[in-house]
Amino acid sequence: MVRRIEDYYSGVWNDWCPGCGNFGILSSMYRAFAELDLPLDKVVVVSGIGCSGKTPHFIKVNGVHTLHGRAIPFATGIKLSNPDLTVVVNGGDGDLLGIGAGHFVALGRRNLDITVILHNNTVYGLTKGQASPTLKKGLKPKSLPKPNIQDSLNPIALAITSGYSFVARGYSMMVEHLKDLIKKALQHKGAALIEVLQPCITYDNIHTPEYYRKRIYKLEEIGWDPVARNPEEDMEKIVKAVMKSMENDEKIPIGVFYQNMYKESFEKRIEMRIPSYLENPPAKQKIDEEGRPIIDEEMFKKLFSQYIVEVKK
Amino acid sequence: MGVFMMRDELSFIIGGPQGAGIETSATILTYALAYCGIGVISDREYFSNIKGRHSYVHFEISSKTIPQYFTYPVQILASLDHETIFTHYEDLEDGGVLIYDVDVNERSLQNTLSMEEALRNNLSRRFREIGLDGSVKSVVEYLSRERNVNIIPISFSNTIKDIVEKTTLPASQLARYVSSIIIGAIASVLALPLDSIKFALEKRFADKPELVANNELIINTVYEFVKNIGGRVFSLSPPIHEHRELIVVSGNDVIAMAKIVAGLRYQSYYPITPAADESFTLESYERIEIDGHEYGSIIVFQTEDEISAINSAIGAALTGVRSSTSTSGPGFSLMVEGLGWAGMNETPIVITYYQRGGPSTGLPTRGGQSDLLFSLYASHGEFSRIIIASGDHLEAFYDTIEAFNLAERYQLPVIHLVDKFLANSIVSMPLPNFSEIEIERGKLVKDSIDGYKRFNLSHPISPRAPIGSKNISWYTGDEHDEFGHICEDPENREKMYRKRMEKLKIADEEIPQEKRLTYFGLEDADLLLVGWGFTKGVAVEAARRLTREGLRTAYLNIKMFSPFPSKLAKKILNKFDDEKIVAVEHNYSAQASKIIQLNTGIAITRKILKYTGRPIHLNELIDGVKKIVGGLREVVLVHGP
């Protein structure tokens, strides 16, 4: 069965600002899902809070709209219990890198097979444009009363050094390119980050489509090879990718910065301990026999023999 | 030969520096006692410290029953160090037994810097009053002279030296076995058969025969040595209970076992005392393997914080697996936002909440019951939740399974309230009755439903299709429509809100009130103690003993606080006059009595409270009740180092 883009439309009316960068991200997701022909009931889109948080409602796959900053923990529980599911996280820059930064880092450490789409518009849109962790120091988008005095952080460098094994950047206005990145990330086995640059047309008069149009170029056009195929070349790829991610003033690269092809996913690490895990994960297990626990008294005594003392006659 | 004293029950304390093997000794003795059919409960008291601070285990043993309380004074004090003698010498019964290391005779209170200053100053004053110079020797002589205590002096260093001569073990290694000296001495004073000790060692060090052999050698040597000294022997009468098998288990472990039986498949946690041991135990059983066959597996997942713990557990629950997290107060504080999401999204999730002394870091390794109101009201907004509190280990086993059943039946978060007292006390417990155990998964659907609506409004409890089954569902922390999409329509809001709230009403109608509280004692008692959680054991025993003394006392134990068994509680409470009802709780404000008042309109005005982080002891509770009967409205208990 080949699914069409429209098959992924939920029919829920979209209330993002007209012209919002989120539309480009949503479009790219529809297209990526359709091109990969993902079964609707085997995909879960998990989001946090903010404009990006509404994303799951617009897609006809399972949607979990969670708490501010916490999409990754929810997604982690879903993926670990049912590794057959394709799990995508959509979160804003404030959500994933501010309140949720601890979880963002933790996902990298685990390399769990989840794709994180970071909607980076440098502001907290839904609360009227406060500075986000990606807004550079000294900038004052029109929503801010005073220029920002906190340094910005670099999501690409943070993801790479946290252990994400697929790290890319896209641009919301380049849907075809972004769709390809999302497809690659979904096909990658391990934690994937796609930072998506996205103008907030209502609150940010600095990072406009015009601003990005002048600066953006594609890494693939300069012959960038992001792939670390073995541990020997990994260090070099990491250092190069991190350095490349520092380039963000006059020129802004998009594309895949770094991809590690050999690092084992968290699912594989669990499988080392529980060999049956991928075949029979928690979500597929039966836990009762007609309302009785699988473990009966005799089995209980065997399982916990260490604790059981037979009283001497 | 010693002087034999036959007893049904007794208490003893083993004390020493944290990290010296006290916990292992306690487990070995519990195995040995259980093997002999003796009922045991032991309370472990320790500081938030890895090595060096004073810790002790308070044992209560009985050949009549499995004790559920702790009492003072104790009949035996076994000390690994001088600090134990200083700290506990007053707790020893006149005519009791002191086991101690003569090598610490010259150690003085003044130089015991590991002891907290407040206690040191108090003891200093006390020693001056009774004319002691502050040395161990002076305290030991005092106990022998004034308190008729039978002193069992053992030179730990000489014992080790003697054994070095008998084995090939280097002395440096043997130093690690000093806690076995204590085991040998206690076994001797209790006249435990040596085969019980051998059994216990083999149980504890299952795959390490050399540890069994070395410990056995020390224990047997000391056992004989103490026997040859003579003196008092507290011999226990033959056991009269019926149990052929006993489970030697801590509260943490019994809950882990119950979760495995309940079908738990996902447990997330962030390390915290006194909850983390449960998750460690679960992890060691992550593959549920019996006779070479795997019956399932559990993901036990250490998260980056408690926020992630609860939220990933909720995520797991959305896929239809039984999922839980275990924590204590500071962790639960962080989990509260997630709790609200679970309430809003009608997600079955179990939170095992081990209370400790708060607020803030509080008393991280001590017990308390001060989080009842918090667990009932935590989160902004309103939603249904179930709160169950367990009174002892066996109850905790059944309640854990019930928590999962209720969570799935009513599709809501269940908070299972236990505490440090339960978590860290080791008991010899009878086997649970498996014929009573059911697994009820509620309205869990796996087949495809046309136009599936996760929050179908036709009944407060909607069919629940797990994510990954054939139905697509949406969830959101926002108010939502039947599909789970954001919806602020006032009419929908009212219906959804009521749907969530009415589930508790249904639970209240369906869960029998008799299962939510228990009344212990005579129907026509004159005085009623009211409590919950770990207070149960001591309160039941206090009521029994007071009744025996002529003060006809009963105890009402509340197990479920939400939905609260209002009708039955009211019926019972109404039989007693105001001044005849006494709240017994491990907190300052008698939190359960506030919930009782809220639900029944009956105000409990008499209170016995303890919030030092140490358990309420039987002796002080009995005294406290007598003071209340004598006219006091409130008694605050403080006993126990």
Image (cartoon, rainbow, N blue to C red):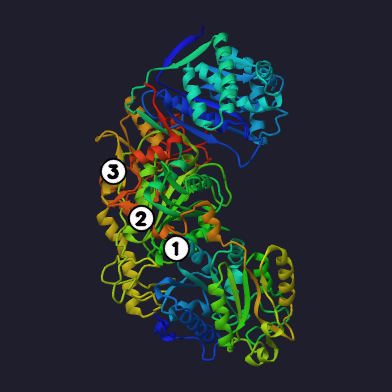
- For the residue pair A284 and B120, the one nearer the viewer reads as A284
Please identify, in this view, whether the residue under mark 3 or under mark 1 is nearer the observer: 1
**Chain designation of label 3:** B
Q: 10 Å neighbourhood of mark 2: few (<14), some, or many (≥20)?
A: some
The answer, for residue B67, to whether it is visible in the render is yes
| Mark 2 secondary-structure assignment | loop
Kind of residue indicated by mark 3 = Glu
- For the residue pair B256 and B164, the one nearer the viewer reads as B164
- Residue at 51 percent across and 32 percent down: it is B206
- Residue at 43 percent across and 79 percent down: it is A57
**Chain designation of label 1:** A
Kind of residue indicated by mark 1 = Asn
Q: Is residue B500 above or below residue B261?
A: below
Is label 3 on the same chain as label 2? Answer: no
The answer, for residue A131, to whether it is visible in the render is no
Q: Mark 1 sits on what residue?
A: A82
Left or right of B297: which side holds B129?
right
Q: Is residue B345 above or below residue A21?
A: above
Q: CA distance from mark 3 to mark 1?
A: 31 Å
Q: CA distance from mark 2 to mark 1?
A: 14 Å
Kind of residue indicated by mark 2 = Lys
Residue B382 circle label:
none
Q: 10 Å neighbourhood of mark 1: few (<14), some, or many (≥20)?
A: many
Q: Mark 2 sits on what residue?
A: A286
| Mark 1 secondary-structure assignment | loop
Quadrant occupied by the C terminus of chain B = top right
Q: Position of residue B119 (x, y in %)?
A: 63, 33
- Residue at 43 percent across and 45 percent down: it is B289
Q: Mark 3 sits on what residue?
A: B436
| Mark 3 secondary-structure assignment | helix
